[in-house]
Image: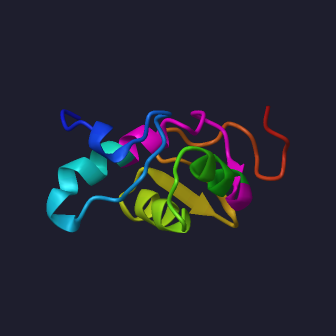
Amino acid sequence: MTKSIHDFQDEYGRITSWPSDRRRAHQLAILDHLKNLLEAGVSYSEDEVLGLLQDHSTLDDVRVLLTELVDSDYVTGQDGRYWRADARPVREFGEASG
């Protein structure tokens, strides 16, 4: 991804705003960045994902980011669990990750 996300981050690297739809390339760069917060091959509860997104953004509603991640096929979910779309979990749902 060649678009920079620096204009949408604060000095701590947190996402501070969501680009408009006409800046889709910037949206995708942010989503790619956020996807990498999830470890490949690990499933996460919704609360865990929302917590990670909250820690890495200043947005009031981080559910927007989760929705964008899922709708744009960066993250996949099933039965309240989420994982990177490019790396299906190696553990069965319900098992502790770590």
Q: Is residue 67 above or below residue 94?
A: below
Q: Is residue 22 above or below residue 54?
A: below
**Horizontal side, residue 63 vs residue 96: left or right:** left
- Please give the name of the residue rendered at 85% of the width and 41% of the height, measured from the top-left corner: 96
Residue 51 percent location from the top left of the image: 68, 52
- Please give the name of the residue rendered at 55% of the width and 44% of the height, measured from the top-left corner: 56
Q: Is residue 6 above or below residue 49?
A: above
Image quadrant in which you'd find residue 37: top right
Residue 68 percent location from the top left of the image: 41, 62
Q: Which residues are magenta?
A: 31-47
Image quadrant occupied by the N terminus: top left
Image quadrant occupied by the C terminus: top right
Q: Is residue 56 above or below residue 82?
A: above
> Residue lying furthest left in this view?
22
Magenta highlight on residue 45 = yes
Q: Nearer the viewer, residue 28 or 56?
A: 56
- Please give the name of the residue rendered at 38% of the width and 48% of the height, measured from the top-left corner: 31
